[in-house]
Image: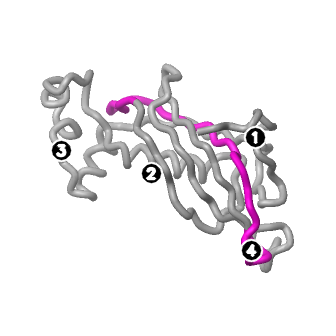
Amino acid sequence: MTVPSIGRRLPPGHHAFDDVVPGDQIETGETEISAAMVDAFATLTGDQFSIHMSETAARDYGFHGRVAHGLLVLSVVDGLKNQADAQFDAVASLGWDWSFRRPVLAGDRVRAMITVLDKRQTRAAGRGILRLGVTVTNQTNEVVQEGTNLLMVRRLSGPGWPENR
């Protein structure tokens, strides 16, 4: 993932397509990926692979503890993005290109740095698409997941602006 030169940290508030330029960043808060979250995700999805459910099994596979589902962590990070002080004025997520770099263990803490990589207008006058680079780190600043997210956002001139913001 090629990251443009670092821009500014976006201030608190909602940011539309026209507000941002490549290099602008949002930093999320941090949260713990608890064993209870892993259990709930396994129940919800049916993914009860042994490294997620058993400390012993995870250690038998060479991990230092129960491994959180990669998709659980991605989902939590998307939630952190949507709870950050600075947010994009999103319409819809259009897709993810994602890699799991290191295991996230139950009890680890994660946060994300989100960088605007590029942007393009759509045929719809009120919308644009941002390509975001997302880097997820744990409590020791190791990169555990990373990738890109295509996010459709409102334009300043779009229908419903600003009353639907």
Query: Mark 3 to mark 1: distance in Å?
Result: 39 Å
Q: Is residue 76 above or below residue 126?
A: above
Segment tinted magenta in the rendering: 102-127
Q: Is residue 119 magenta?
A: yes
Q: Is residue 81 left or right of residue 50?
A: right
Q: Residue at x 51, y 45 (%)?
A: 77
Q: Amino acid at mark 3?
A: Phe
Q: Quadrant of residue 61?
A: top left
Disc sitting over residue 49 in the figure: 3
Return the residue at label 1.
23
Q: Nearer the viewer, residue 60 or 2?
A: 2
Q: Residue at x 69, y 46 (%)?
A: 117
Q: Residue at x 73, y 56 (%)?
A: 119
Q: Quadrant of residue 89?
A: bottom right
Return the residue at label 4.
164
Image coords of residue 114 (percent x, y): 64, 42
Q: Nearer the viewer, mark 2 or mark 1?
A: 1
Q: Amino acid at mark 2?
A: Ser
Q: Nearer the viewer, mark 2 or mark 4?
A: 2
Q: Nearer the viewer, mark 3 or mark 4?
A: 3
Q: Is residue 121 magenta?
A: yes
Q: Nearer the viewer, residue 19 or 163?
A: 19
